[in-house]
């Protein structure tokens, strides 16, 4: 019987009870991790279809931020060209979480641990957490077992205090690096739920290579961190342990984020550069596909960084992770098979995932390569050789007595008294005396001045000015000593290379190019050497000129390996004479001597204020020495 104002009561049936139980069970399974206090794994970034707000255009000029250059732009059918591409975007910043995983094992006792403290302080200084509230730093030290010294915090004073107390523990004869990496990963993942936007997570792992646990365990632990979208930066100090640093190279997310130091004295520079780089990370990942036109062939294994080449589709593919504001630098070599004009690469595609996980797409600028002609056959050169010895015996008896007295007196009495007094008043101009003595060598020079523009060049000299200013002054001295027949190019480098001025004789333009050099993190010496070689093969290079490269650097190469720098030096010396100037104490001297090709072509200076004198000495040698 029904009553007014009341709802009829429905009796529960067995079917309804089963349905209710199933629904409740399903809800319990969904909510169980949260109810039990277990962390919920974040959904994969960039899967929601959100479009990236990053821009591939310069907001001030409206021009593309990315560039593509072919060097040289015109070649013969038998020659090759290098295609260099820089891929850049502009994005908003997101929170940054960094955990330092620092070695405090027994092998770090004494000066090494003091250098580690200095390096960690330098990193914190660059991060400037007081003015960047979204930046947090934590510290985990590793010896026999990992220790969480500081959990992620924006309190710079607390972080500095823990750094100051970091020391080697007497009982730390072992080094459990795998456990330290795992703990850092867990802390970074857990901290994501505390911020509204997923941060860029960075783990900086420092080890001296003397791991007491099997190296593959550290590599495996780092792999798990990378799988959680964590950038792993690895720094290894070579201590002679077999395979130690080789394993650390595999710990890093990529070669770009692996650093190797001989001893601990260079750690401060490395940590400062790491901080400057990670604060400018714009993208979590990027996929670039270049399609080559028919008739333009890829030279095997020439891509830097390494790329997957599909011969059937004629495509080069790069899958890159964690791209900074400086962008991604790509290069590869091509060879033509016909006399024609090629457009490279009209069908390029770029897809990226920004730091917020949103997806973006863009295209890249094209560039044109002109193949002017077939190569001149060798017989043309051979046919000119026979007449030369034929004329020589005929002219020798007739001309010898006439030429001998004419040439001998001219340089001896005239040149010596005329030029001796000119350089006497100022010792800095002594090289000019030598230049004048060598003026009878009328062969022009094509010279590339390669100048280190890494952030360490901001270090002050004994005179109180930044090293880069002293280097610029020295380069201007070199240009001022060039003869009228000489041309020069100005090339700066840090994480990328910048052709500030191509080969030419306009002294004012060269000076302006030198003054325009700006510093940025990292020291890609290998890229700089290859770029110098490319400029000496460009259309601006003169076939009749002798070729010279002068490299100036104040640090060890980063984002590359010594072997790659050595190979780049060999490629360069196949085209030019090389001179190297090393400034300060953080130089891999044997490597730089290898780049120069001879001990006497490497110059070491303790202070950058001496660069003007060294550049002047090299200017003298470039003219007076035979190639």
Image (cartoon, grey):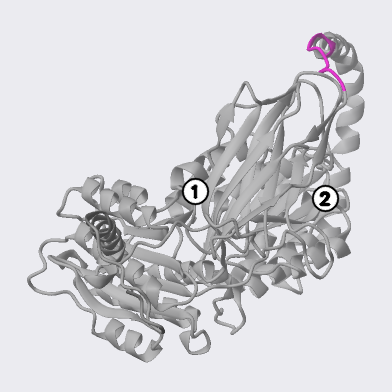
Q: Point out residue 212 in the picture as x, y percentages from the top left corner.
A: 14, 54
Q: Quadrant of residue 121?
A: bottom left
Q: Which residue is mark 2?
A: 487
Q: Is residue 310 left or right of residue 538?
A: left
Element type at marker 2? strand
Residue 6 position (above or below residue 487): below
Position of 17 with respect to 293 (left or right) is left
Q: Nearer the viewer, residue 258 or 199?
A: 199
Q: Is residue 237 magenta?
A: no
Which portion, as a residue range, is magenta?
Answer: 373-380
Label 1 to label 2: alpha-carbon separation: 25 Å
Query: Which mark identifies residue 593?
Result: 1
Q: Is residue 442 above or below residue 276?
A: above
Number of marks drawn? 2
Q: Is residue 304 visible?
A: no
Asked if the residue under mark 2 is in contact with the one under mark 1, i.e. CB atoms within 8 Å, the reply is: no
Q: Earlier in the sequence, mark 1 or mark 2?
A: 2
10 Å neighbourhood of mark 2: few (<14), some, or many (≥20)? many
Membership of 377 in magenta stretch:
yes
Would residue 466 be seen by someone viewing this image from the given angle?
yes
Q: Nearer the viewer, residue 95 or 332?
A: 95
């Amino acid at each position: 019987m029904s009553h007014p104002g009341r709802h009829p009561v429905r009796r529960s049936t067995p079917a309804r009870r089963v349905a209710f139980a199933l629904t409740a069970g399903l809800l319990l399974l969904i909510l169980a991790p949260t109810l039990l206090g277990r962390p919920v794994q974040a959904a994969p970034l960039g899967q929601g279809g959100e479009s990236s707000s990053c821009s591939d255009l310069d907001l001030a000029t409206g021009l593309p931020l990315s560039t593509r250059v072919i060097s040289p732009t015109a070649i013969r059918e038998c020659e090759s060209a290098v295609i260099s591409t820089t891929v850049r975007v502009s994005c908003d910043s997101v929170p940054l979480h960094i955990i330092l995983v620092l070695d405090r094992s027994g092998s770090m006792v004494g000066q090494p641990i003091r250098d580690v403290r200095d390096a960690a302080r330098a990193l914190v200084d660059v991060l400037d957490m007081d003015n960047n509230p979204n930046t947090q730093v934590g510290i985990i030290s590793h010896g026999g077992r990992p220790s969480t010294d500081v959990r992620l915090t924006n309190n710079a004073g607390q972080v500095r205090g823990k750094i100051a107390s970091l020391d080697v523990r007497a009982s730390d004869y072992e080094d459990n690096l795998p456990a330290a990496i795992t703990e850092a990963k867990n802390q970074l993942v857990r901290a994501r739920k505390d911020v509204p936007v997923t941060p860029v997570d960075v783990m900086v792992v420092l080890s001296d290579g003397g791991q007491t646990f099997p190296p593959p365990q550290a590599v495996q632990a780092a792999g798990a961190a990378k799988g959680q979208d964590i950038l792993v930066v690895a720094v290894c100090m070579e201590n002679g342990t077999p395979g130690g640093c080789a394993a650390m190279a595999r710990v890093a997310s990529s070669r770009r984020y692996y650093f190797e130091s001989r001893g601990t004295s260079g750690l401060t520079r490395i940590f400062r550069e790491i901080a400057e780089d990670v604060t400018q990370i714009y993208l979590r990942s990027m996929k670039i596909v270049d399609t080559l036109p028919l008739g333009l062939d890829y030279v095997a294994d020439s891509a830097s960084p390494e790329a997957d080449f599909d011969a059937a589709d004629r495509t080069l593919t790069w899958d890159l992770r964690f791209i900074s504001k400086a962008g991604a630098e790509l290069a590869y070599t091509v060879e033509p098979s016909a006399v024609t004009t090629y457009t490279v690469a009209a069908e390029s595609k770029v897809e990226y995932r920004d730091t917020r996980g949103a997806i973006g797409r863009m295209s890249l600028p094209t560039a044109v390569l002109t193949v002017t002609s077939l190569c001149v056959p060798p017989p043309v050169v051979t046919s000119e050789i026979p007449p030369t010895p034929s004329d020589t015996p005929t002219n020798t008896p007739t001309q010898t007595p006439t030429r001998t007295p004419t040439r001998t007196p001219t340089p001896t009495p005239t040149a010596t008294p005329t030029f001796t007094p000119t350089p006497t008043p100022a010792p800095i101009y002594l090289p000019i005396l030598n230049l004048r003595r060598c003026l009878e060598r009328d062969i022009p020079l094509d010279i590339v001045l390669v100048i280190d523009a890494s952030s360490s060049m901001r270090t002050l000299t004994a005179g109180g000015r930044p090293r880069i200013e002293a280097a610029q002054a020295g380069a201007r001295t070199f240009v001022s000593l060039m003869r009228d027949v000489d041309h020069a190019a100005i090339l700066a480098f840090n994480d990328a290379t910048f052709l500030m001025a191509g080969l030419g004789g306009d002294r004012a333009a060269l000076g302006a190019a030198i003054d325009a050099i700006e510093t940025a993190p990292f020291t890609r010496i290998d890229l700089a050497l290859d770029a110098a070689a490319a400029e000496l093969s460009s259309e601006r290079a003169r076939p009749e000129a002798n070729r010279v490269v002068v490299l100036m650097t104040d640090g060890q190469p980063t984002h590359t390996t010594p072997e790659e720098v050595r190979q780049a030096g060999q490629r360069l010396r196949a085209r030019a004479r090389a001179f190297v100037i090393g400034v300060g104490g953080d130089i891999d001297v044997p490597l730089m001597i290898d780049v120069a090709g001879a001990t006497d072509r490497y110059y070491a200076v303790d202070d950058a204020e001496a660069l003007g004198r060294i550049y002047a000495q090299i200017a003298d040698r470039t003219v007076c020495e035979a190639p």
